[in-house]
Image (cartoon, rainbow, N blue to C red):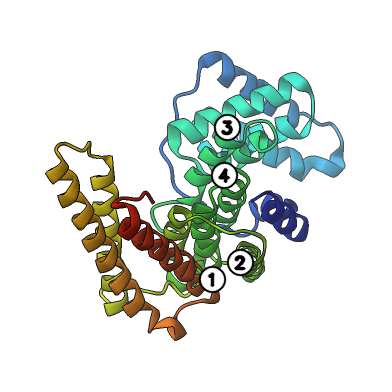
Amino acid sequence: MIGVIIALWFYIGFVFGRLSCAAGQPVPVTNSPIIEPELFAKAVDHAKTLAVTTDPQYKQHQKQHQQLLEQLRNGSVEALYTVAQSLNQRNVGEDRITSVQLWHALADGADHVASAVALGFSYAEVDKELALKYFVQASNGDDEGPHQASLYNAGRLLLELNDAASSLAYIRACATVEKNYPAYETPAQTKTCKEAYELLSNQIMTKTTPGIEDAIEMFLYASIDDVPQENTKEFTKWSKAMEFLQTYASLMQEEDGTADDASKKAKAFMTYLLSAQEQLLSLQKSSKSFSELQNYLLEIILGRIQVLVTASTATGESEL
């Protein structure tokens, strides 16, 4: 997947998420976090320095900082976040550490979306799995809808961590936010996510050859139109095929007993493989409704099943 990663991120870039995290997203209502007294004192001290100015030109600015200080003392989550941002922007070692500690308190203790986004960027270059954790948390947004930029950033990191199926799922979710959560969508982000989804799909088809397990994991996320949808004939056929393959895989894990047991298992192998193949071949007849990537993945799955059928016929057993 390395070639896919390089192509996708040179084309899209990392700036998209960094810029978009402050772009018009609804501000969620959160519970007040528990802040260690020493950490809270640092936040208050910094807010006091912001509020101090003798320049008449900045009287209105001073008033805003005084309000910030009052909100901070009253336990405002947004005030704490603003102070953390200010500390981080000073780019001083100790201040940056304090800002991250404040974001942790807000994200971990109050599910504060903007703080989780900030932590995602803070860890993106040094601890990708931890960054992913916070982008995924932020992507859930508030009780009303998701955080679109974080859906993209989670998908980006998932691909870097070699999870193409989950990457497709998150980038598709970003690209289709407008369908279910129009108030949480911005056209620029939607455009970027659609481009990223198309590019990733093309790269998977042209630069990689997924195994059967990867192909199966990606299939349901490989259509930006969410095809096949639940409660359709196509989805039922896919589900039945997966049940047959799962039963086949489970049988493969069982230890052989007597020769008679081995013979029964061999017959069962063939039964479940052929049943899965039958469902998928029937599903393939609906190929016009599937994406190009889905048809590509379906060919891989059917090709591997045919290999297994041939091997089972010749030897009596085979593995996925």
State the image quarter where residue 53 is shown. Answer: top right
State the image quarter where residue 301 is shown. Answer: bottom left
Q: Who comes first in sequence, dot 1 or dot 3?
A: 3
Give the residue pinned by disc 4: 114
Q: Who comes first in sequence, dot 1 or dot 4?
A: 4
Q: Who comes first in sequence, dot 4 or dot 2?
A: 4
The residue sitting at the top extreme is 38
Give the structural element (helix, strand or loop) at label 3. Answer: helix
Q: CA distance from mark 4 to mark 2?
A: 35 Å
Q: Amino acid at mark 4?
A: Ala
Q: Amino acid at mark 1?
A: Leu
Q: Who comes first in sequence, dot 2 or dot 3?
A: 3
- Front disc: 4 or 2: 2
Give the residue pinned by disc 2: 205
At horizontal 26% and vertical 53% (from top left) the residue drawn is 248
At horizontal 51% and vertical 69% (from top left) the residue drawn is 176
State the image quarter where residue 33 is shown. Answer: top left
At horizontal 66% and vertical 69% (from top left) the residue drawn is 195
State the image coordinates of residue 199 (x, y, percent, origin top left). 66, 66
State the image coordinates of residue 312 (x, y, percent, origin top left). 32, 56
Q: Nearer the viewer, residue 228 or 304?
A: 304
